Image (spheres, rainbow, N blue to C red):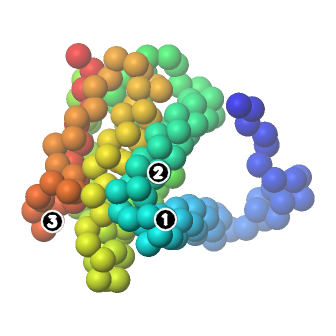
């Protein structure tokens, strides 16, 4: 898949004229808009076909998205094959998934990283709509595993907790990334 320069020259010039704070706010707005579309599609599929079907479709989409995003970030930031754990986590921090997760905590050393999501906008939005927790483990695991393995096929990704697992009120999910 080829990456094409984003937008026309005029579009890039308009964005370049924006003050940096406004440009960053605009960038995050666009990331949130992509998540809104994802959520609306999910809710529509869930309403028509049920949570299991929606989750299976969502999982397939995010597994593919993980590979596309990791490859794009690899090219953009000139990441070598077989990236180490800190590099994988640095790329993950720049992914559309992580950019929209402001309540994440990442602890990294050379061989291992722990990613915790202490608050989750998706889950909170569902609960505010009187919907059940989204059993997102299948979706997140597929995304995180494919993202990391695209950057280094040796990395292991382990789910320590994620819905539908029971979790403490101050933690939605926790993931481990390890290079054996």
Alpha carbons under labels 3 and 2: distance apart: 28 Å
Q: Residues within 10 Å of mark 3 (few under 14, many from 20)?
A: few
Q: Secondary structure at mark 2?
A: helix
Please report the residue visible at 71 percent of the width from the left and 31 percent of the height from the top. 1
Please report the residue visible at 29 percent of the width from the left and 83 percent of the height from the top. 130
- Residue 160 in which image quadrant: top left
* Front: mark 3 or 2: 2
**Residue 97: x and y, percent?**
45, 52
Say whether residue 28 is left or right of residue 102: right
In the displayed structure, would residue 7 be above or below residue 34? above
Q: Residues within 10 Å of mark 2 (few under 14, many from 20)?
A: some
Residue, disc 3: 170
Alpha carbons under labels 3 and 1: distance apart: 29 Å
- Residue 45 badge: 1
* Front: mark 3 or 1: 1
Say whether residue 82 is left or right of residue 38: left
Please report the residue visible at 68 percent of the width from the left and 68 percent of the height from the top. 19
Residue reaching furthest to the front? 49
Residue, disc 2: 57
The answer to which of marks 3 and 1 sits earlier in the sequence is: 1
Q: Residues within 10 Å of mark 1 (few under 14, many from 20)?
A: some
Of 51 and 79, which appears nearest the observer? 51
Of 36 and 164, which appears nearest the observer? 164
């Amino acid at each position: 898949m080829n990456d094409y320069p984003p937008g026309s020259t005029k579009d890039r010039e308009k964005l370049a004229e924006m003050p940096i704070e406004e440009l960053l706010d605009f960038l995050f707005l666009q990331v949130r808009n992509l998540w809104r579309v994802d959520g609306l599609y999910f809710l529509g599929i869930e309403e028509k076909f049920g949570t299991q079907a929606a989750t299976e479709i969502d999982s397939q989409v995010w597994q593919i998205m993980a590979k596309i995003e990791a490859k794009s970030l690899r090219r953009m930031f000139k990441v070598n094959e077989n990236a180490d754990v800190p590099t994988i986590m640095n790329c993950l921090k720049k992914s559309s998934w992580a950019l929209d997760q402001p309540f994440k905590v990442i602890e990294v050393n050379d061989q291992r990283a722990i990613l915790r999501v202490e608050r989750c906008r998706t889950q909170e939005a569902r609960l505010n709509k009187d919907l059940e927790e989204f059993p997102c483990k299948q979706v997140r695991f597929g995304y995180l595993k494919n993202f990391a393995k695209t950057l280094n096929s040796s990395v292991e990704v382990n789910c320590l907790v994620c819905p539908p697992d029971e979790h403490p009120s101050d933690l939605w999910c926790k993931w481990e990334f390890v290079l054996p």
